[in-house]
């Protein structure tokens, strides 16, 4: 039995390095390819759509944070090309809107201003907010070092996309089975946003990880690994 293709899309300000601990888990079930989130933004190409079109069979999409709405949008446009979705700390809409619980819209604009004023400090503060308890200097240094190669314009474009993207209306039309994994101490994307995502996707399973923050896969690696393995094993055996 051949492994289906899988596309991996990381979160804002991160790189494909974040997938390294997960590659052995994912490679058990699928043949993975990491895409740069910068190339997946609507105004910077359609890297996900191109990958889906060229793949020999329907694709498993794995997205973290920003990667989630990018994959949801691709699944909306190409539902027949998506076999399953794994969404880590993801959302269909980042910003709060009426009764919808999300991040404050002003927070995204504030991040853009701080990015322009002091990129290094802003990124370190953001990465620190991804953990429920203080992360070590080594962890934060590694994340900041990896982000150093991302152009400022791309970081700003990613924030602009997050501030505007709204895939909520598209969710009922995405038929692929989905695993939504979220930490209950996520300070970036509220747990309520993940519940909305799981409640409105037709075939979604929500796994809430107690004590985990936005970097859910790192806050609780073994728990997330087990959930992803079980989900893919079930979905890909059908």
Image: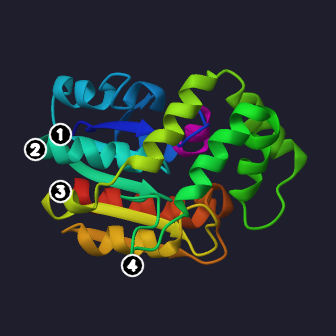
Tell which tag, 4 or 3, sits nearer the viewer: 4
Residue 196, by quadrant, is bottom left
Q: Earlier in the sequence, mark 4 or mark 2?
A: 2
Q: Provide the residue designation for mark 2.
A: 80
Disc 1 crowd, CA 10 A, few/some/many (<14, 14-19, 20+): some
Residue 217 visible (yes or no):
no
In the rendered view, would you say 87 is above or below 60?
below
Q: Closer to the observer: label 4 or label 1?
A: 4
Judging by the rendered image, the residue that carries numbered circle 3 is 174
Q: Earlier in the sequence, mark 4 or mark 1?
A: 1
Kind of element beneath mark 3: loop
Q: Position of residue 218 (x, y in %)?
A: 65, 55
Colour scheme of the picture = rainbow
Q: Are marks 2 and 1 in contact (CB under 8 Å)?
A: yes
Q: Nearer the viewer, residue 104 or 222?
A: 104
- Foreground of the two, 86 or 225: 86
- Dot 4 falls on a residue whose secondary structure is loop
Q: Nearer the viewer, mark 2 or mark 1?
A: 2
Q: Are marks 4 and 3 in contact (CB under 8 Å)?
A: no
Q: Check the picture and name the quadrant holding the C terminus.
A: bottom left
């Amino acid at each position: 039995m051949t492994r289906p293709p899988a596309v991996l899309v990381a979160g804002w300000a991160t790189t494909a390095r974040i997938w390294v601990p997960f590659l052995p888990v994912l490679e058990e079930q699928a043949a993975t390819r990491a895409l740069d989130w910068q190339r997946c933004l609507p105004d910077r190409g359609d890297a996900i759509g191109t990958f889906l079109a060229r793949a020999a069979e329907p694709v498993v999409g794995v997205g973290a944070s920003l990667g989630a709405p990018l994959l949801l949008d691709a699944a909306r446009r190409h539902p027949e090309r998506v076999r399953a979705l794994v969404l880590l700390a993801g959302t269909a809409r980042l910003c709060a809107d009426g009764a919808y619980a999300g991040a404050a819209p002003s927070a995204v604009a504030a991040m853009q201003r701080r990015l322009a004023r002091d990129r290094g400090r802003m990124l370190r503060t953001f990465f620190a907010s991804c953990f429920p308890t203080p992360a070590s200097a080594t962890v934060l240094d590694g994340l900041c070092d990896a982000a150093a190669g991302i152009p400022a314009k791309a970081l700003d474009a990613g924030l602009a996309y997050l501030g505007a993207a709204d895939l909520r209306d598209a969710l009922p039309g995405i038929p692929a089975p989905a695993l939504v994994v979220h930490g209950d101490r996520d300070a970036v994307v509220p747990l309520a946003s993940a519940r909305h995502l799981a409640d409105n996707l037709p075939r979604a399973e929500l796994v809430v990880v107690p004590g985990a923050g936005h970097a859910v896969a790192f806050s609780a690696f073994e728990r997330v690994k087990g959930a992803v393995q079980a989900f893919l094993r079930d979905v890909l055996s059908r």
